[in-house]
Structure formats: C-alpha cells, structure tokens
Image (spheres, coloured by chain):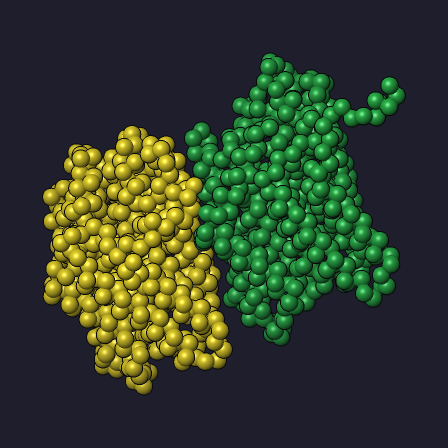
Amino acid sequence: MDFPILLTILLAPLVASLVLMFIPKEENILIKSISAAGMFVSLALSLYAYFTYNQDIGGLQFVFGHDMPWISDLGVTFFLAVDGISLPMLLLTNLIGFSAIFASWNINNRPKEFFILLLMLIAGVMGTFIAHDLFIFLLFYEVVVIPIYILVIIWGSSKRVTKEYAGMKLTMYLLIGSGFLLVGVIALFVKTTAIAGHPDMSFTGMAMAAQQLGEFDQIWLFALMLFGFGSLISMWPFHSWSPDGYAGAPTAVSMIHAGVLKKIGGYGLIKIAVYMLPLGASFFAPYMAVLGVIGVAYAAMGAMAQKDLKYVVGYSSVSHMGYVILAVACLNVIGINGAVANMFAHGVMAALFFSMIGFIYEKTHTRWIPDMGGLARQTPRLAVGFMLAAMASLGLPGLVSFVPEFTIFIASFDVYGGVAVIGIAGIIITALYVLRAGANTLFGPPRPEYDHLEDIKGPEMVPLVVLGTVLVVGGCLPSLLFDMINSGVVPLHAAISDALQLGGKL
Amino acid sequence: MPADMFVLTLPFDPSALTLEMLMAVLATLVLIMGIIVPKGSRHGLGWVSLLGILGILAVAVSLWGEKRELLNGMYLLDNYALFWKITFMTAAALVILGCMRFIDNMGNQAEYYSLTLFATLGMMVMASAGDFITFYLGLELMTLSFVILVCFRKTDAKSVEAGIKYLLLAGMSSAVLLYGLTLIYGLTGSITILEIGRIIAMQPLSPALVLAVVLVIAGLGFKISAVPFHMWSPDVYEGAPTPVTAYLAVGSKAASFAIIMRLFISGLPGIWENWAMVMAILAAVTIIVGNLVAIPQTNIKRMLAYSSIAQAGYILVGLVTATEAGIKGVMFYAFLYVFATMAAFVVVAYYYNVAGSDELKDYAGLAQRSPLLAAVMLVALLSMAGIPPLAGFAGKFYLFKTIVDGYLWLVFVGLIMSMVSVYYYLRVALVMYRDDPVDATPISVSSPVAVTLVFATIATLVIGICPGPLSEIVNGAAHTFFLH
C-alpha cells in the first residue's frame, strides 16, 4: 500500500489537537506553534497531492480504505479519495486553515481550548471533502457544527447581534437543514439498497443505483438535498444566518465558515445531489437558477446598505454563492467547472477579507465603516490585503475570481439567457459596495486616534502572504485550477448526461 | 400413582435461570452483609455488588449463543434476552461505580445496593419472560424496588413525594396493564405469548381485543414514559436521588422495551396493522412533546427527564415495522443510550455532591473547573441529539431506515426534532463553556467516577465512529427473536 496521504492530511490537525490537550494552558506560544505545525503538515501534503495528481488519468486518486469495511450491514467503507473536484476544495481548506491559525495569533483568552476546537473544525471540514462514502461524509458534515458553536459563544463578538444569538442561529439553520438532508440520505439509502440488492454507501456505488430511480423519487429526494445543502451554501431564502453568524463569530471561524464550510453545500450539491439524482436536478435546475439570481441581486443590495464591515462581506458571500448555484443549475461542464472554480476563488478571497477585517477590529475595536477614516496611511500592509480581497471580490482580471465568474456568465447566459443577465448585472452592485467599503475604510481622511496603530507584522502577515499569493497566482495561471477541475467534472457529467434533459429555458 | 404426581411432565431445565439465580443470590448476600458488616465499612458493599455484577456479566457473555426454553415457552433464554440482560447489567455496573460516594452520603448502602440488584433481577426476568405471569412478576419486582429507591432520601420531602407519586401511578398503570392482559387471556385462553400469537392470527379482530391492546399500550406506555403517559417522569426524575433517576431512566425503560417487543411482535403480529399506526403516532407525539417541553427547563434533571421521554419516542420508532431490522434498531439504540444517559447522570450526581444544586445556572463555568465533567456531559448530550461521530447518530440511522417506506412522515418528525433538541442541549454547553465560574476552585474527580465517565464516553465515541462490530452482535441477537 502506498503512503496514505489523505489519511495523514486528515489526521495531522487531529493529532495536533490531541497533543494540545496535554499542554499546560499557560504555554501560549507553544500551543500556537503546535497548531501551526499540524496545519503545515496538512498544507504541505495537500499541495503535494494537488501537484502530483495525474490529470490525464483523472478519476479517484490517492484512494484509501475502499476495501476497508466500516459498517458492513450499511455498506459503509472508510473510503477516502479525491478527484478533480474535491482536490481544489481540500487545498482550499488547508490554505485557509493554515492562515486561520495565524489570524488567531493574538487570541490570549483560553487559547488552548480555542486551538483544540479550531483544529477539530478544520479536520472536520477536510473530512467532508475527501470522504467518498456518503455515511462518512455525513459524519464529518455534522461534526463541524459543535466546535463552531462553542467557538462563537466564547470568542465571538457581540457588536450588533449577541454572540449567543449568532452562534445559535448559525447552528440551528445548519442542523435543521442537515435534518432534511439526513431524511433524504436515509431514504436514498433504503431505495438504492433495494435496487442494487446490497447496501453500498460509496458515492460511486450509490450513484449507480440512484440514477435508476424513477423521476418522482429523484425529484423529492433532490428537494430534500437542495434544502439541506442550500441552507449550508446560504441559498436565498435560507441565507439569513450568514451575515449574522459571521458578524458574531471570531475571525478564524468566519474565515473557515465563509471560506470553506459553506462550500460543502456547493460541493454536496454537485457531487451528491446532481451526480446521484440527475432527473431531480434537471427538474429543479430552473428553480435553482432563479433562487441563485435572486440571491445574487438581493444580497448585493443588502451589502450596499451595511455599515458594518463584517456584514458587508457576509452579504457579499451570500451574493457570490448565488453565482455558484446559478452555475450548478446550468448542469453542463462549463457551468459546473465555473461553480467549483468560483467556490475556490471566493473561499480564498473571503478568508483574506475576514482575516483583514479581524485585524482591523482587533486594532481599532470597531467594524463600523464611517469610523475608520483612512487606515491606508496608518496601516499600509493591512490596506494591501484588504484591497487585494476587495479587488478579487469584484472580479478584477488578473486575480483568481475573474476567470471563474466569466465562465459562469458564459455558461448561464447560454442556458438561461435573460435570467442570467440579471445575475451578471449583480457584479456592478458588487463593485459599488466593495469600492465604497474600501474607500471609506482605507482612503478617507486619516483619523488621529488611529495614528498609533501598529501595522500587521510577523505571524499576522501569514494570511496576507499565503492567501494573497494564491489570489495572484490563481489569477495569472487559471489553468492550474481549471485543468484540475475539468478533469473531475468531465467524467461526472458524462455519467449523468444521458439523464439530463434540461427542462425549457426561461 | 401418587409418586407420579410429583414428576414433572414438562421439560424443566433450570440452567436457563442461571443468571437470575446468581443475581438473586448476590442481592440477598449484599443485604445480609449489610447486617454483619460494621457501619463504618459499608461503603465496601458497593464494590461487592459491582464485582458480583461483573461476574454475572461474564457468565452472561459466556452463555451467548445458547438457546434454552423453560416450561413450554414460559421462560426464554436466547441471544435476544441475553443482550438485554447484558444491557441492564452494564447500566447497573456503571451506576454503581459512578455514584458510590453519592450513596455513601445517603447512608443505608446495603439496602440501596440490594434493591438496585433486585430491580436488575426484575428486568432480567422481563427480558426472558415468555408468558404473562413471568412478565408481570418481573415487572412488579422491578417497579417495587424502584419505588423504594425513589424515596430513598427519607428526609428529603421531594424524594418522598416522588416516591409516593411513583407508587400511585405505577400501581394505576399496572392495573390498567393487568386488565388488558386479562382480556387477552379471556379471548385466547392462553397466557403464553407465542401461543397467543398463533391463536390471534386465526381469529377475526374483535372490539375486546382492540380494547385489550389499547390498555396494554397504556400500561406499558407509562413504563417507557411515552406521551401522554409521561406526566410522572419529570417529577419523579427530579425528586429521586440522581443515581436512582439514572437507573430508572435507562433500566426500567429498556426492560419495558424488551417485553413490549415480545408482547407485540411475537404475541400480536396478527393485528400488526392495527397497533403499528398507534405506535407510530405515539412515537411522533412523544418525540415532539419531549423535545419541546425540554426547552424551557431550568433544572438539569428535569431537562434530562424530558429528553429521556424524547429518547423513548425515538426507540418506539423501531417497533412500528415489527421487522428484524426494527428490533435491531431498538436494541442498538437502547444499548448506546445506556452510556450517554449514565454519563450525563453521573456528572449530575457528582456535581451535586460538589455544588449541592441541580439547577442549570449553577453549572456555569464547569468547563474551567473540571474539563472532564464538562466534556463528558457535552458528549453525552450530543450523542442523545444524534450528532456524529457519536453513537446516537448511528443509532438513529438504524432506527429510521426501517420506516422510510410507509412512515416517511415519522422520519421527518424524528430527525427534525432531534435537530431541535440540539437547541436545549447546547444551552447546557453554553453555560458550561462560556460563563466564568462563581467559585473557580478546580473540581477533582475521584477515580471510580473518572473511570465510569471515561469508559462511557469512550464507548459512545467508539460505537459512533465504528458501529460495525456492535451492529453485528445486535443483528445476531435480533435474529434469534423470531426463532421460537
């Protein structure tokens, strides 16, 4: 057997958190260093995996445990594998997770518990992206909720909503969504077992049986999954947890939540819902497209009205996820490529945004845009990170999010015509609120009370360097990202293309 | 001729009673030792009981796979019964190991331990009961032992009140149950469950039988505290000494489920479609009411009482289809429920010794005073809520997958309400983790308690992450259910 690279990536943060449990809570720097070391191992290995993945062969690689029966009477195996869709997501998780450790470098209130929970959270998110078994996927999917809740209620901030409210809202939305998802999964399991004659919960095995389900079954099962994954990806009208939740959460949680956790919704939609239930997907595609477009426009308008930086980015992330839903709803290779790429791009951008806002809040103790003045003079490095994220958010060419958005526009215009135009117009509003937030925070008249502010330095620079590099490199060499994704999307689409007859254009 | 009168014509194999006889001996032994042993060293009786239970547990495990029958199906020993007995004894062992200091503070250790063992004996008889008389015998032995245990803190008005309440309502429910059983006997002329099953399958449905079934459901619904027969449980759970509450919540419920399945699935399969819908509605109402009423509770024992009502609702789900998969789901869930409930109640009992309160607000800052207690509590509660990777998730998966065809609405009710239950479970987490303690002195957890808690937590985690092995065992146990 080869070196179990995926298992190591998954276990490194968990081992680190286990080690932390035995370290005295006063050892502040040691705790943070161990966390960083654990994440570094994962990050390095996932970079290695990303660049050694053989795109010519495609399919599942770095397979681990597919022959390891886990729960035999449910047909569950501890099946870890990645393809061109999950690998970018795994890399994204590690990039953001690694940065999040450094974005939390200044946490001195109960740091031991904080980093233990944070590492568990990151490992849980990674698990969802590398699991190739629906049961194991669910295991990781719900396991992340609890660390988030505790992180929010202890280390969150109560500026506009109390952190207790934010934490509970975040948790309840996701859990109720996952309750519906769970009903769908259990029903799907029972029905596929009846078709296949034996239980099999691996994605591929289940999809083979599920694709034979009748149209009616596929439709209601897809509806349940759409609700579950939709509330995770903050699809309009299940989005309202997102701005409140991010505002209440500590920086690292906002980064991970907006950066990757949300993407589990999009990832699940593509790799589980659409893949297994293509008839259901083609039935719901037009509705998804409409909901996606409404999300884009509505949330962009919402972002315009906000004066709290975290709310601006919170709404903007809802708006960006609208594009992802619109792209998935295209149900063609270009669209799904765009959806996955946009999730990656938005993840990097949102994480950078939140980490910069976190530093601003830490230093100025406010997130209120009119109170900022001209921070660019006082904290130039912070301003660079902020503007980099802002430019990526509005899709500046040369940064990572331009090509994905462009791809989505092409795909959705092709399929949905007029509706897509509304979505595309959302980018104008995006430019408006992003530039306004940037201008009022960074380039207004400098305020004397912030003159003494220290710019980010040392470990605080890590999020900026890591995520900023990815933003630029991904923008200049989009093929690095797109070739990978394409190698995963093409076979997935081929498997379902027979079943896909997209119902009439809108 | 006269000599023949004493020759048993039925096959009598007393080895089927090995475990029960051992348990009876142990219980009596503990009671007698209580008289002999001087007052100062009676705390050792806990260890005697514990070792005794572990010994009987070992015998039970060694009997695995045996299939014995006593007096024409009056008493059944098979893997099904053995699994339940192992469940009860595990619960008893955990509650004794985890709450020794609590018992020492109450005094009268000999009586306490011996009654706990007698209650266990009653449960073990119920799990094996093949006819109404045996079943009722076990049920009453268990109930009466619990009545005394509930009011064990004689000087505490709440405890005595709980005891009287339990006595009255248990007597009432027993009467209702007996009335139902009598009607069934009148209709079939038999008290042996398997024989009743055969007779009823051939009879047309009569109104008297319907009445009988309703009365039996009501009588047993009381024992498992299914809504609307749950009124007693919050008061009794709150008033009873915490170790008793723990054992009442786990043991009496599990034993009742063991006999409910025998009674309904073996005894009344002929009219399955008539009672299945009732069970489904009962399950739904129990899940909804239990979870919703748990939300506003401020006393942790009351909250756990309502949550255990909801748990009984989940377990009822497995009964609805009356299939092997359903039986397996019930047994699997009941087994893992032991660990979660025991862990939660042992924390409550231990913390009561420290803080003298069961109010939720007094748990503030527990995470800083004792990370172990807080973490165990959190894991136990989340397992009850069914959050992976804890055991409750796998348990719910097994339960609900049996009713997807035909009772999909119940799947919705169950899973959505279990997500709602996270709301009140997390409130405990909020108080324990967010708040700063009023009195920050660290709590040192004595080693027997630590062992109990760690064991229960590890069991919850292991069953959750890797339910395969346990699932195989339970499959084997559920399989023997239909082999009579």
Nearer to us in this view, A77 or A225: A77
- Left or right side of A5 for A163: right
The count of marks equals 0
Counting from the top left corner in percent of width and height, residue B119 is at 73, 45
Q: Which residue is at 24% across, 69% downward?
A: A467
Q: Quadrant of residue A13?
A: bottom left
> Is any part of residue A482 visible from this angle?
yes
Q: Which residue is at 71% across, 42% downward?
A: B18
- Left or right side of A343 for A76: right
Counting from the top left corner in percent of width and height, residue B283 is at 55, 36
Counting from the top left corner in percent of width and height, residue B72 is at 69, 26
Q: Which residue is at 27% across, 38% downward?
A: A208
Q: Which residue is at 46% across, 31% downward?
A: B407
Residue B155's place in the image compared with A110, above or below, is above
Nearer to us in this view, A357 or B147: B147
- Left or right side of B229 for A78: left
Nearer to us in this view, A90 or B310: A90
Q: Which chain is rendered yellow in the image?
A: A
Q: Which chain is rendered green in the image?
A: B
